[in-house]
Amino acid sequence: MAKLSLFLGCIVPNRYPGIENATKICLEELDLDAVDLPGASCCPAPGVFKSFDKGTWLSLAARNVVISEKMERDVLTICNGCYASLADANIELKNDPEMKAQTNMCLKGIGMEYQGTVEVRHIIELLYEEIGPEKLKSYVTTPLDLKVALHYGCHLIKPTKERKLGNSENPTFFDELVEATGAESVDYTDKMMCCGAGGGVRSGHIEESLEMLEHKLACIQRAGVDCIVNACPFCHLQFDKGQLAVNEKFGTDYSIPVLHYSQLLGLALGISPDKLGIEQNAVQNLEFLAKVYEINAGIR
């Protein structure tokens, strides 16, 4: 197993520190060698920076990778957008000598040089490829009696030729990791549809963003699940705080709890919900909170 540097991105430290804590607890429980990536900046967001100035995007992304290269550790991301930005930049620089040279000209000004000696991993991809669902089950101490609406997110599965995680239209790897916790991954209409946050949609086209989210929430609610599970803090933000905006705009009353996979896994590892930051969300469903505390206490 490779040594890892944990790239937190922007949203987790600033909005959902519970996801950071949950991730670190899970990494420790699984005996994975991961340390913080000191001095990391924004990834930067691929849907914005890359679209406007590819050179700037590559240089900023490469700077983060170089920090990890100096540590001789692969980069571990817990966000689909961060994964897309850093992994795609890393692949492009490894395979394009001219772009690598141009990027290193920029990095030279801050005393850095991109070598291409490490990989960029997503926590879901890492757990699936390096541990696997069956072995992960052996770590579970508290099987979860929960029905889950799983949201893969766009950047985790596409571009398919780079991700290499199976069929991007009907993937199963994330579902398998969810079910390794004892939870049931429930199928629902338009499961693979975007949440409406990425690509600058939430920032620049909020009306369309909320319409997309309301459709997803309606499909999820009809499926009769206990919670939504994701592996991307930006999707998490959209499903969590976005629910409040959807309720205000459309007069709905959605109150569907939202968990990052590290929080779901933490529950299955017997960690108390308060240590996993589950109560930090904007959506506070008291029935769900009572249920996860009962699961943690062994009552259910």
Image (cartoon, rainbow, N blue to C red):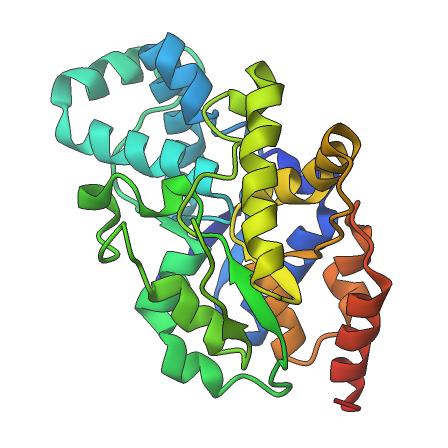
Above or below: residue 236 compared with residue 24: above
Q: For this rendering, which residue is in front, 276 or 65? A: 276
- Which x, y percent locates residue 174? 41, 63
Above or below: residue 71 compared with residue 96: below
Q: Is residue 99 left or right of residue 27?
A: left
Q: Which quadrant of the figure has residue 99?
A: top left
Q: For this rendering, which residue is in front, 288 or 97? A: 288
Q: Which quadrant of the figure has residue 130?
A: bottom left
- Residue at 29 percent across and 16 percent down: it is 103
Q: Residue furthest bottom?
A: 299
- Residue at 86 percent across and 64 percent down: it is 286
- Which x, y percent locates residue 240? 69, 44
Q: How many labels, in total?
A: 0
Above or below: residue 8 compared with residue 137: above
Quadrant including the N terminus: bottom left
Q: For this rendering, which residue is in front, 106 or 282? A: 282
Q: Is residue 141 left or right of residue 99?
A: right
Residue 4 visible to an observer of this rendering: yes
Q: Is residue 64 left or right of residue 42?
A: left
- Which x, y percent locates residue 77? 47, 47
Quadrant including the C terminus: bottom right
Residue 73 visible to an observer of this rendering: no
- Residue at 60 percent across and 85 percent down: it is 143
